[in-house]
Image (cartoon, rainbow, N blue to C red):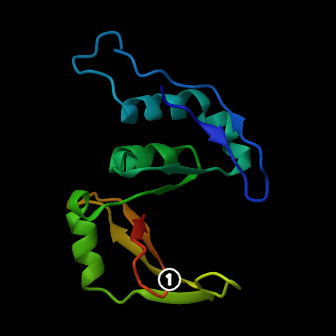
Amino acid sequence: MLAAMIVAPGHNMVLPLMPEFITPQDGAEKQDCERNAAKRWLLAQGERVTNLRPVYLGDALFSCQPLAEAVLATGADFMFVCKKDGHKTLYEFIEGAPLGQHTVIERRPGKRSLTYGYRWIETVPLRNSKNALNVNWLGVSITDETKKLPMTGLS
């Protein structure tokens, strides 16, 4: 089941929305999957939440051009995890380009301080093709004094 819900900063409640079940579809040759369920959900429910200006969040499974285009077609935005091994073109582009950077240090009394590092670049190709969707990429790193906390990348 693909479960969608509404969350908002500063609120401690979640509003669940209609789910989309991952089941074989009539006439389909392939087994159903989360990506197809997400596309169906967007077609059936996306218009209902358009006025909320949603930002759809998803893991690396959802970080593909057809799903990104489906989100954009509803007038919404997305933030999907984008891993190096699955998006080689995007990461090759990033490695050769200047990135915006910003660092914030959070000093926590009695605890280790945390350093938040942000890197970003706009309009990078999501895949290697002539019709590649250009996306904005954001990388976030969180480290303490030992520098042992991991870094993540989002697109």
Query: What is the crowding at mark 1: few (fewer than 14 residues within 10 Å), some, or many (at least 20)?
Result: some
* Residue in the foreground of this view, choosing between 103 and 154: 103
Q: What is the x, y in percent for residue 146?
A: 43, 85
Is 113 placed left or right of 148 in the picture?
right
Dot 1 amino acid type? Asp
Q: What is the x, y in percent for residue 65?
A: 34, 50
Q: Which residue is mark 1?
A: 144
Q: What is the x, y in percent for residue 50?
A: 67, 43
Q: Quadrant of residue 138?
A: bottom left
94 lies above or below 61:
below
Q: Quadrant of residue 153?
A: bottom left
Residue at 46 percent across and 34 percent down: it is 38
Q: What is the x, y in percent for residue 141?
A: 45, 77
Q: Quadrant of residue 6?
A: top right
Residue at 50 percent across and 82 percent down: it is 144
Is 59 placed left or right of 50 in the picture?
left
134 lies above or below 110:
above
Residue at 25 percent across and 61 percent down: it is 87
93 lies above or below 145:
above
Indicate the secondary structure of the residue bearing disc 1.
loop
